[in-house]
């Protein structure tokens, strides 16, 4: 009995110690929040204590809209979570996204990435990023693309237009979003791996593109609840199971494609065409870039260069076709082109580029937050002091809807670009900003210009279809990291 009473007493003492420690941790946590400079920043009261609301909106694909509403309520600086602050103050944005890379990418990017080896997109290491950028930027320059890869872009766009015309003749309407996806994936596949996926010729997705799609739904889990992914795979939950089976196939395809291209290159075969990685194969032989690094960056190009361009083109067609006045003005401008027009000719059509810029403003390829870390010592951003280690962000969705910069911000109005102001240029960031600005922005613009020109020259009277229940609800945006349409389609018809 004595031994039992002693055991009870010891257990009671242990429980008191545990309870005391727990209370201490809670008190310390509360104290830490209360004295944190972040607690003094504008924002909803609950964002001092928890990030659950932000994560919930992220899972719903509504985070960008939620943060935008907070900016409308609280102003250009808003605390959205205990360690995360968003800005739309242009002076603060310039500091966060500067060319010196003093504000590193946050760990969030490494969680989002689907590849094992860091690449130009996912790496947080400043020296590694500079190394990648030095090796990869030259083939992505405007001059290099025009001299080396413009023919590939034109041929794939032409095939997409042919596919759209054929399907429209057969069915009376066509889902253009599908064809823009085929076009964009085949272009970046050809330029990255040295061979096209053949999607635009077949009019269907091949295994690689289908597998890539299976990875997309896991993005919120990878960045928020990564431990759930292996558990979901083990339990055989379909979305996790499909992604688990697709991931190694995606990786193997990329590796085999790179190895095949390298073998052809070394054999000096006449079949070898230049890719965005031709130069770095010789660099890798000098130990500067490994095959694994090339493969990782090629995969990043595929992911970054497919849905982005396809979604932008889809929203461009939808926006223009809903406004007959804009459509007529665009078609009239395009009809002034010579029959064998060049990329330079397209660059010189002001209204075409205004239409593209206005589409990118309202439907930016990456409209969501681009998280960075405040460097050692903290920083004053705008009117507020932010401690080191804090995640600071800006999202294009909000920057592009500031009514003081963009009158009637929700109106699709290409004419606003006739008189570009300095503040418009500073606030416009559809491809990001600073040293980490999208490396493929010139390729994206080349695709957008040529695809827009060819589509509206071929279908000057195109209009949004109402077949199969197609409506504006299908085009309501959903945003995780990239933007997509709610309905996953955009039906168009033409007389």
Image (cartoon, rainbow, N blue to C red):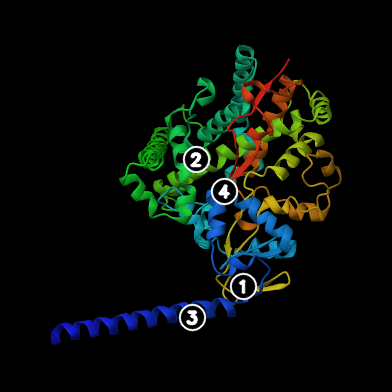
Q: Residue at x 70, y 62 (%)?
A: 94
Q: In this view, does 216 lie above or below 66?
A: above
Q: Which residue does the numbered mark 1 point to in the structure image?
A: 38
Q: Quadrant of residue 81?
A: bottom right
Q: Distance between the residues labelled 3 and 4?
A: 34 Å
Question: SS of the residue at dot 3?
Answer: helix
Mark 3, residue position: 28
Q: What element carries label 2?
A: helix
Residue identifier under label 4 = 481
Q: Residue 278 carries which label?
A: 2
The Cα atoms of the two marked residues, 3 and 1, are separated by 16 Å
State how far apart marks 4 and 2 are (Cα). 30 Å
Give the CA distance from mark 2 to mark 1: 47 Å
Quarter of the rendering containing residue 70? bottom right
Q: Dot 4: few (<14), some (14–19), or many (≥20) neighbours within 10 Å?
A: some
Q: Residues within 10 Å of mark 1 (few under 14, many from 20)?
A: many
Q: In which quarter of the image is the C terminus?
A: top right
Out of 123 and 31, give the one closest to the viewer: 31
**In this rendering, the label closer to the viewer, 3 or 4:** 3
In the depicted view, which residue is nearer to us: 266 or 460?
460
Q: Which residue of the protein is positioned furthest toward the right in this rendering? A: 419
Give the total of numbered labels: 4
Disc 2 versus disc 1: nearer the observer: 1
- Please indicate, yes or no, whether residue 134 appears anywhere in the rendered image: no
């Amino acid at each position: 009995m004595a031994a039992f009473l002693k055991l009870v007493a010891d257990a009671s003492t242990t429980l008191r110690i545990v309870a005391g420690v727990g209370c201490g941790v809670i008190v310390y946590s509360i104290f830490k929040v209360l004295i944190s400079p972040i607690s003094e920043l504008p924002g909803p009261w609950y964002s001092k204590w928890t990030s659950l609301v932000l994560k919930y909106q992220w899972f719903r694909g509504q985070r960008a809209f939620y943060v935008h509403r907070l900016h409308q309520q609280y102003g250009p600086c808003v605390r959205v979570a205990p360690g995360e602050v968003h800005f739309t103050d242009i002076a603060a944005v310039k500091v966060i996204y500067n060319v010196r890379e003093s504000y590193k990418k946050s760990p969030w990017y490494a969680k989002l990435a689907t590849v094992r080896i860091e690449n130009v997109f996912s790496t947080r290491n400043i020296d590694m990023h500079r190394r990648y950028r030095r090796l990869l930027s030259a083939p992505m320059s405007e001059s290099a693309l025009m001299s080396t890869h413009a023919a590939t872009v034109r041929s794939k766009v032409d095939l997409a237009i042919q596919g759209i015309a054929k399907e429209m003749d057969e069915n009376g309407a066509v889902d253009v979003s599908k064809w823009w996806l085929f076009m964009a994936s085949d272009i970046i596949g050809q330029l990255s791996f040295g061979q096209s996926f053949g999607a635009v010729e077949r009019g269907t997705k091949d295994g690689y593109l289908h597998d890539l799609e299976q990875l997309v739904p896991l993005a919120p889990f990878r960045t928020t609840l990564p431990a759930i992914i292996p558990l979901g795979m083990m339990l055989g939950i379909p979305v996790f199971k499909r992604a688990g089976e697709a991931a190694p196939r995606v990786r193997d395809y990329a590796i085999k494609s790179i190895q095949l291209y390298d073998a052809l290159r070394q054999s000096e075969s006449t079949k070898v065409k230049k890719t965005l990685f031709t130069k770095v194969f010789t660099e890798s032989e000098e130990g500067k870039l490994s095959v694994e690094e090339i493969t990782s960056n090629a995969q990043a190009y595929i992911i970054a260069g497919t849905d982005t361009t396809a979604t932008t083109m889809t929203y461009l067609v939808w926006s223009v076709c809903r406004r007959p006045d804009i459509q007529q003005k665009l078609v009239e401008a395009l009809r002034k082109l010579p029959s064998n027009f060049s990329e330079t000719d397209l660059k010189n059509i002001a209204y075409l580029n205004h239409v593209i810029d206005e589409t990118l403003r309202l439907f930016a390829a990456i409209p969501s937050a681009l998280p960075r870390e405040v460097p050692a010592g903290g920083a004053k951003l705008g009117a507020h002091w932010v401690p080191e280690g804090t995640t600071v962000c800006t999202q294009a969705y909000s920057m592009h809807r500031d009514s003081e910069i963009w009158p009637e911000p929700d109106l699709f109005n290409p004419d606003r670009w006739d008189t570009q102001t300095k503040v418009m240029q500073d606030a416009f960031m559809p491809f990001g900003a600073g040293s980490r600005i999208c490396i493929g922005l010139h390729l994206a613009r080349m695709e957008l210009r040529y695809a827009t020109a060819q589509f509206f020259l071929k279908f000057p009277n195109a209009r949004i279809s109402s077949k199969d229940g197609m409506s504006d609800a299908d085009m309501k945006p959903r945003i995780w990291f990239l933007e997509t349409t709610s309905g996953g389609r955009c039906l168009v018809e033409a007389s």
